[in-house]
Amino acid sequence: MKKKIIFIGVIFSIFLVFVLIKSLIVDRPANSGRIRILTSPISGVILNDTPQGNTPYEVAYGPGLHRLKLIPQKQEGNFTPWEGQIEVFENALTYVIFELGSSDLTSSGEILTVKKMSKNNSAELGALNVETKPVGAVVAFDSDEKGVSPISVYNIVPGTYELKISMPGFISRTQKIQIHKDRVVDAKIKLALDSDYKTIDQLIEEEKKEASQEALLENAKQEIAEASQIEQFVTIKNTESEFLNVRELPSINSKKIDEVLPNKKFKYLKKEGDWFQILLDDSSSGWVYKDYVISE
């Protein structure tokens, strides 16, 4: 009986040692980081294909690269999900801020990660790394332009700063960030396309359309005037030569057919572009340039 008790005691001791080793070595968790997520509108959070809940959301999570998907929960409006990778570091915060739009092009946001410095001239200062989508955006730090992305800024005095990212054709992003000593802020920023932005080609095309509409309106007025037989007149302005040339056709290169004196009034038959066709005293007609007449 005594031997049996000793045997059971030995087995129990071995079991306790196994449990202790397992708890200290096998089951000991790695130092985790934290993930904090804010979105507009409220969105469902899926990490590594596992639903986690809705935003705002915060959780301790193991270090490494993780797949993040944000699913808009708002019923009104047209919002599209966002999906990408985030990196979590030991004892560091990964901060995700996103504004979801109707497509990936109109969605924007930041992924900010604060981690220990691996390179710095002084442990008392901090640093900032900025990557943007699209690349080449202007990076301003407290209104001081540092260059275009991707860019790294070292030797920053700890404190709160305003980070602004801008690029023609995209909506600027502004975010307050906290710089800590011996820490670097990794900022991955996505810009949303500005639907109100117009390229030079688009502006030229719009000007052409406006000019075409104005020409159509002018022609319509002319046709109405002709149809109603309303007599319209122009008065010749004073010129340096004390007379105004009358052309055969509405062009400066056209043949000169007559001269008219300043302050004289003539009936005009129609207007074509910048030229008026006037009825001369001998009942013939010719063209005069608009800058030298006053229309009535």
Image: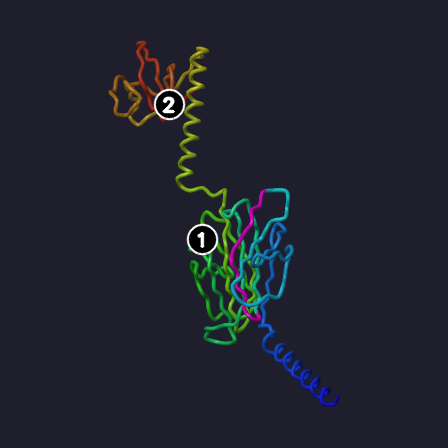
Q: Nearer the viewer, mark 1 or mark 2?
A: 1
Please rate how many residues cluster around mark 1, counting C-alpha atoms within 10 Å: few if below 14, some from 14 to 19, many from 20: some
Residue 252 location, x and y as percent? Answer: 28, 25
Q: Identify the residue at the far left of this view.
A: 255
* Amino acid under disc 1: Pro
Q: Nearer the viewer, residue 252 or 64?
A: 64
| Secondary element at image label 1 | loop
**Which residue occupies 49% across, 66% down?**
128
**Which residue occupies 44% across, 19% down?**
220
Q: Nearer the viewer, residue 261 or 153?
A: 153
| Secondary element at image label 2 | strand
Instruction: Decide: is 218 above or below 48.
Output: above
Residue 283 location, x and y as percent? Answer: 32, 9
Q: Which residue was labeled with disc 2?
A: 293
* Inter-mark Cα distance, 1 to 2: 55 Å
**Which residue occupies 75% across, 88% down?**
1
Q: Which residue was labeled with disc 1?
A: 134
Please rate how many residues cluster around mark 2, counting C-alpha atoms within 10 Å: few if below 14, some from 14 to 19, many from 20: many
Residue 81 included in the magenta stretch of the image: yes
Quarter of the image with the C terminus is top left
Judging from the image, the colouring scheme is rainbow
Quadrant of the rendered image containing residue 242: top left
* Amino acid under disc 2: Val
Instruction: Decide: is 41 above or below 95.
Output: above
Q: Nearer the viewer, residue 260 or 136?
A: 136
Tell me where the magenta segment starts and ends, as one range.
Answer: 78-91
Q: Nearer the viewer, residue 147 or 251?
A: 147
